[in-house]
Image: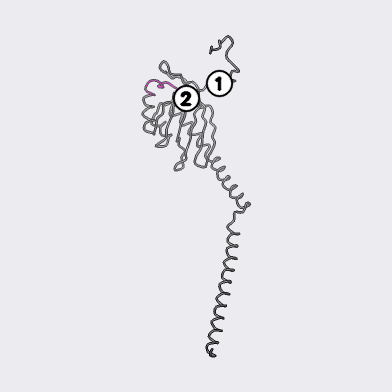
Amino acid sequence: MTRTGWGGLYIAKRSCSGAKRDHKHKLWVERINGARMKRHTRWNPWWLSIAFVALGGAASAATADDEGSIRQLQSAQADAWNRHDAAAYAALFTEDGDCVNVVGWWWKGRVQIENKLNAAFAFVFHESQLTITDTSVRFLSPTIAVAHVSWTMTGAKVPPGMPEPRQGIEIQVLQKKSGHWLIESFQNTNAIPERPFPAGPPRGHAKPQS
């Protein structure tokens, strides 16, 4: 082989060795950077606990700020009912809110709720008076709440075969929209004072024959 040929082979070997070293160095740098990124992006339990505390604080703040507004809505409910103002009562609901009354009639949407109440106020509830006796509010999120609302009523003139609404409890799902709390879903139930379940059949009650 000529001198030039040996020189060319030497240069080629050096170039190849340099390329290998550059490739190894690149892999080493990528491995180091990957470990750093993994370390920085790994969930730290301490930071996670801070995040949960922050979210919990936001929910608590919403509860403290908004519970009064929901209680005021219940006062507005009684006021609208006692004035027999179907439009004002329906306005407490969202546009697509629904209402199930004490006998299980299901009214869907603000318009239908208003129409049904207009018919109810014409005679059956024309002289009725609603009193809110207790309100319990529980927040599911800063914009969603559940309320249990106890009530009493006088003056209803129900037809035969229909239970007279004297006292009961409402379950309301409320949503905060544009800064205002409205009823999204409403379930009403007649109530009687709670008492223990019977331990057996009444005395003197004949057992059914098999």
Residue 165 percent coordinates (x, y):
47, 21
Q: Residue at x 58, y 50 (%)?
A: 51
Q: How many marks?
A: 2
Which numbered disc, 1 or 2, marks the residue that appears first in the sequence?
2
Residue 34 percent coordinates (x, y):
57, 63
Seen in the picture, residue 5 relative to 93 is either above or below; the reply is below
- Location of the N terminus (image quadrant): bottom right
Magenta residues span: 120-131
Q: Quadrant of residue 163?
A: top left
Residue 27 percent coordinates (x, y):
57, 68
**Residue assigned mark 1:** 193
Is disc 1 surrounded by few (<14), some (14 to 19) or many (20+) residues within 10 Å?
Answer: few
- Any mark on residue 159, and which? none
Residue 131 percent coordinates (x, y):
49, 25
**Residue assigned mark 2:** 130
Seen in the picture, residue 137 relative to 15 is either above or below; the reply is above
Q: Amino acid at mark 1?
A: Pro
Q: Residue at x 53, y 37 (%)?
A: 67
Q: Quadrant of residue 111?
A: top left
Q: Quadrant of residue 205?
A: top right
| Magenta residue check for 203 | no
Display coloring:
one colour
Quick one: 37 or 173, which is closer to the camera? 37
